[in-house]
Image (cartoon, rainbow, N blue to C red):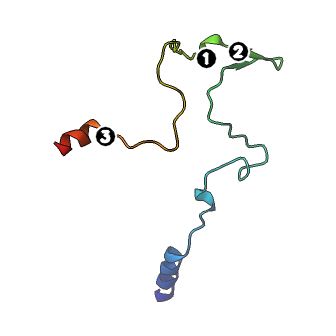
Amino acid sequence: MALGLLLGIGRAFRKKSTASLDILTAKTGPRNFYKGKNCKPTGFHTRKGGYVLVQGKLPNYVVPNLRDFQLKPYVSQCARETQTMGAADAAK
């Protein structure tokens, strides 16, 4: 009885295998496992091996007209120190 109790306690404190807790990737999964890139499909496969794109599933980016926009798309690495509204109010 005491030996069985000691063995049960020993099994409880034994280091558990963490291999089952790892994230399943294409390298750690089975030979034919394909996880993908977490992208939504843009169409569907046909019976004859083709692929049909669905226009409703394609991304549609709406870009505003930036012709007279005064800011430049460059951010300097040597940025000047500026005060924000909260810091200006605290200084008063």
The answer to whether mark 2 and mark 1 are in CB contact below 8 A is: yes
Residue 57's disc number: 1
Residue extending farthest left = 92
Q: Which residue is mark 2?
A: 53
Q: Earlier in the sequence, mark 3 or mark 2?
A: 2
60 is higher (above) or lower (below) than 75: above
Please name the amino acid that badge 3 sits on: Gln
Q: Residue at x 50, y 76 (%)?
A: 13
Mark 2 burial class by Cα count in 10 Å: few <14, some 14-19, many 20+: few
> Which SS class for mark 2?
strand
Question: On the rendered image, what quadrant is the C terminus found in?
Answer: top left
70 or 49: which is nearer to us? 70
31 is higher (above) or lower (below) than 44: below
Where, by quadrant of the figure, is residue 17 drawn?
bottom right
6 or 90: which is nearer to us? 90
Q: Which residue is mark 3?
A: 83
What is the C-alpha distance between the residues marked 3 and 1? 44 Å
Position of 24 with respect to 9 (left or right) is right
Position of 11 with respect to 26 (left or right) is left
Please name the amino acid that badge 1 sits on: Lys
41 or 89: which is nearer to us? 89
Q: Which one is closest to the eye, mark 3 or mark 1?
A: 3
Mark 3 burial class by Cα count in 10 Å: few <14, some 14-19, many 20+: few
Mark 1 burial class by Cα count in 10 Å: few <14, some 14-19, many 20+: few
| Residue 25 screen position, x and y as percent | 68, 48
Residue extending farthest bottom = 2
> Which SS class for mark 3?
loop
Where, by quadrant of the figure, is residue 90 drawn?
top left
Q: Residue at x 79, y 47 (%)?
A: 31
